[in-house]
Image (spheres, rainbow, N blue to C red):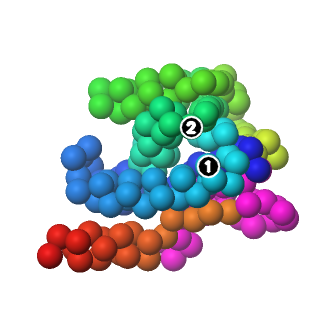
Amino acid sequence: MKSILVCGYKDFELGVFKDDDKKIEIIKLVIRKKLLNLIDQGVEWFIFSGNKGFEFWVLELVNELKDEYDLKTATIFTFENHGESWNEAGKNKLLKFKASDYVSYAYKNYENPGQFKAYNEFLLDHTDGVFYFYDSEHPSNLKYFFALVEEKADYYRLSLSFDDLDEAYNEMLDNYY
């Protein structure tokens, strides 16, 4: 397994509205452990679509881990104008995605809803697996993507769950007291 697609909840879907939110610390703690597991399995490329939240936090950690491991990042935006309407903090995050080792976009402009399905199918067909943070009991627009993932046989899946976060939080509390 050489390449892994990264996708998951956006920051606002998790109730995270500031970069200094304490939830991010716990989420990143769990992400780091799972990234090290993926690296041990031979993953070299981490593929992103350029979303704030889970994807961005993974990107930050992968970039940190590049000091120790030979890792590459790719960001393939859906559209060329991805993130143009974001505020300044969001645009700073966008710049970090644009600093990936490989950057491209699937479409110049939005033309029809079928582009999203074709884009998702392309990502799934060109990666060996997915590292995700999504729970069908807390649906978002990711439900359409995960319907495609479910159809794909022999596709590696690694999830970050709310239970993982609860466990990490309890570990932090145990170590604190």
State the separation of the CA atoms marked 1 and 2: 8 Å
Quarter-of-image position of residue 173: bottom left
Q: Nearer the viewer, residue 69 or 144?
A: 69
Q: Is 149 colored magenta in this rendering?
A: yes
Please state the horizontal and vertical placement of residue 10, each as a whole percent of the image. 44, 51
Q: Nearer the viewer, residue 13 or 169?
A: 169
Q: Please report the residue visible at 76 percent of the width from the left and 50 percent of the height from the top.
A: 1
Secondary structure beneath disc 2?
loop
Please state the horizontal and vertical placement of residue 130, each as a whole percent of the image. 66, 55
Residue sitting at the far front: 68
Magenta region, residue range = 128-156
Q: Please report the residue visible at 56 percent of the width from the left and 37 percent of the height from the top.
A: 69
Labels 1 and 2: the sequence-earlier one: 1
In the picture of the structure, the residue carrying the numbered disc 1 is: 39
In the picture of the structure, the residue carrying the numbered disc 2 is: 69
Q: Nearer the viewer, residue 16 or 159?
A: 159
Q: Is residue 34 above or below residue 94?
A: below
Q: Judge from the rendering whether residue 61 lies leftward or rightward of residue 7; answer left or right.
A: left
Please say if the residues under marks 1 and 2 sit with CB atoms less than 8 Å apart. Answer: yes
Q: Is 101 colored magenta in this rendering?
A: no
Q: Please report the residue visible at 35 percent of the width from the left and 33 percent of the height from the top.
A: 90
Please state the horizontal and vertical placement of residue 30, each as a whole percent of the image. 43, 61
